[in-house]
Amino acid sequence: MSNMTTMLEVAKRAGVSKATVSRVLSGNGYVSQETKDRVFQAIEESGYRPNLLARSLAAKKTQTLGLVVTNTLYHGVYFSELLFHTARMAEDKGRQLLLADGKHSAEEERQAIQYLLDLRCDAIMIYPRFLSVDEIDDIIDSHAQPIMVLNRRLRRNSSHCVYCDQKQTSFNAVEQLIAGGHREIAFITGSMDSPTGVERLSGYKDALTRHGIAINNELIVNGKWTPASGAEGVDTLLARKVSFTALVASNDDMAIGAIKQLHERGMSVPAQTSVIGFDDIAMAPYTIPALSSVKIPVTEMIQETIGRLIFMLDGGEFTPPKTFTGALILRDSAAPLPAR
């Protein structure tokens, strides 16, 4: 039975016109409570289900929020936390979450954004990796739908972004190691085509410079966010025969790989080498030794992002953008350097 026929069936059962049924479903126009009750009873008896797409087009609302994420994040624990909290908070606001894959390039991220725009999502969140700040600003300027950007600081549309200051967060974490007496601090980077990877390395260098410690490029190795690349980073550092009493990995997966490799190579953590990571993943407290890690306030960032999107949809004005910072959670894998 077609949807049009079903609506007519409801109208006949309720003894009203099809237009009256439509007004009851849309909530537009006056309909007496008695008539509403008859219509809802007829709907229940007939098993009628409104065509949600048609209603959305008519109302110019789809009750959906879109999220664009590059698929390089899919394999990490961080992504599952991001997706879980985004879906839960969207549901709390009465919206469904639609996910689009940004894949491997700026053009594919742009296509994913356009896909969600074409689906008429009420608003869109972007977690970009490849699009530049200027390109994102241009996209926001050229579309009416509200767009919010996670983890990137925009120039022209500062109220449309929520980000963690990765550089300052990394600076603070390295500074805590320095305060514990460490001066020979190695660093395993994330992928350097990632803004997060670049900023965390920059924070490390700035902390060393601030405290008069010369930057030794032999203590810096490239990683790829994976445990295997963390283990390979340790092998590279040991092959270079450089001394280090602490090691910072740009995420927890690499830190866990580094700790395992240090153990395999006969180096005790933290007695000989302190190790810290980033993201404070769920397993961090349960590794041996328990991993010290920088906690990024993902939940709070998503809450702020969705709150701003809903505010946009309601036509509100923005307060100044809020900058988030992470905090180092010290556990067993890091310790002050013993006095010599």
Image (tube, grey):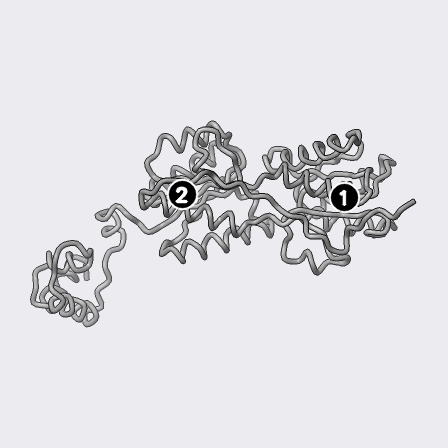
* Marker count (numbered): 2
- Separation of marks 1 and 2 at Cα, in angstroms: 39 Å
Horizontal side, residue 272 vs residue 332: left or right: right
**Disc 2 marks which residue?**
124
Of the residues shown, which amino acid type is indicated by label 1?
A: Leu
**What's the mark number on residue 269?**
none
Left of 222 or right of it: where is 47? left
Q: Residue at x 83, y 43 (%)?
A: 245
Tell me if residue 213 comes above or below residue 119 in the rendering. Answer: above
In the rendered structure, which amino acid carries the disc numbered 2?
Answer: Ile
Q: Nearer the viewer, residue 89 or 207?
A: 207
- Picture layout, residue 275 above or below residue 145: below
In the image as oriented, which residue stretches furthest toward the right?
Answer: 340
Residue 51 percent location from the top left of the image: 24, 56
Helix, strand or loop at label 2? It is strand
Q: Residue at x 63, y 57 (%)?
A: 282
Q: Which residue is mark 1?
A: 177
Task: State which quarter of the image contains the N terminus.
Answer: bottom left
Which mark is first along the chain, 2 or 1?
A: 2
**Residue 57 % position (x, y):** 24, 47
Closest to the observer: 134 or 44? 134
Q: 10 Å neighbourhood of mark 2: few (<14), some, or many (≥20)? A: many
Residue 26, image quadrant: bottom left
